[in-house]
Image: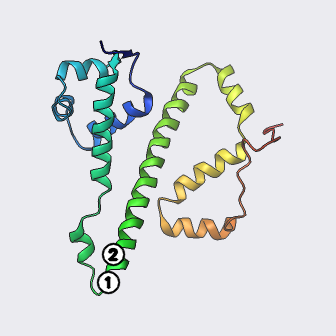
Amino acid sequence: MSLKIDKLPDDIMLKLKDILSEKKWTKAGIARSMNMPGSTFGDIFNGGNVSRKSLGKIKTFLNDNISRNLEVSSDSLSSVENVSKSQLVKKSQFLKETSKRTEKLRHMLLLLEKELGEFRDDSPEARDALRALLDINDIGYIACLLTMICDEDKFQRWMLINGIGKVKFNSFKKGNKPNE
């Protein structure tokens, strides 16, 4: 007997949706790669119950898929002239770590967009409650940082204006009560 879980956790669903949209995979293709019937995967993907066995297959698929994306090809590294093996290893580790951090940030942004969408579609009272808990300056800082980080020249100018390390994030600090 296989124990059932209500549905896929949100973070796993987001990763699957990313693979479908970015890699142009199909649900049937993902199901085949997991040795799972397409109808079973389709039901799970559409919010149906998922067994622990199926959840394990999905997690394994995601781990394998993310690991392949983070691998740095030896061809791209060996094309760099006059670079020692230890420099190649360091470069490879740096690229893998950067890829992991980028992937983590991308998923956080997806979750943020989902949560903000809930507030967008909710009542004015719910949005007022959110505003009461968040520091408006922190929201501006994060929005500006996300915008500036996409262009290195703008980012460097922004850092000079704001001073490196001088901007402090105030929300959720012990005893801090924003917007009072």
Residue 95 horizontal/vertical position (percent): 38, 64
> First in sequence: mark 2 or mark 1?
1
Q: Which part of the image, by quadrant, shows the C terminus?
A: top right
Q: Is residue 45 visible?
A: no
- Near-viewer residue (180 or 6): 6
Residue 86 occupies quadrant: bottom left
Badge 2 vs badge 1, beta-carbon distance below 8 Å: yes
Residue occupied by mark 2:
88
Q: Secondary structure at mark 2?
A: helix
Residue at the spot x=37%, y=30% of the render?
13
> How would you rate the neighbour count of disc 1 (Cα within 10 Å): few for under 14, some for 14-19, many for 20 or more?
few
> How would you rate the neighbour count of disc 2 (Cα within 10 Å): few for under 14, some for 14-19, many for 20 or more?
some
Residue occupied by mark 1:
83
Residue at the spot x=54%, y=22% of the render?
121
Give the Cα distance between marks 2 and 1: 7 Å
Residue 103 horizontal/vertical position (percent): 41, 49
Say whether residue 104 is left or right of residue 165. left
Residue at the spot x=46%, y=54% of the render?
101
Residue 158 horizontal/vertical position (percent): 61, 65
Answer above or below: position of 153 versus 84.
above
Q: Secondary structure at mark 1?
A: loop
Residue 163 horizontal/vertical position (percent): 69, 68
Say whether residue 93 is left or right of residue 58. right
Answer above or below: position of 71 versus 15.
below
Residue 41 occupies quadrant: top left
Answer above or below: position of 16 versus 80.
above
Query: Which mark is drawn over residue 167?
Result: none
Q: Which part of the image, by quadrant, shows the N terminus?
A: top left
Q: Is residue 123 visible?
A: yes
Say whether residue 4 is left or right of residue 153. left
Q: Which residue type does callout 1 highlight?
A: Val
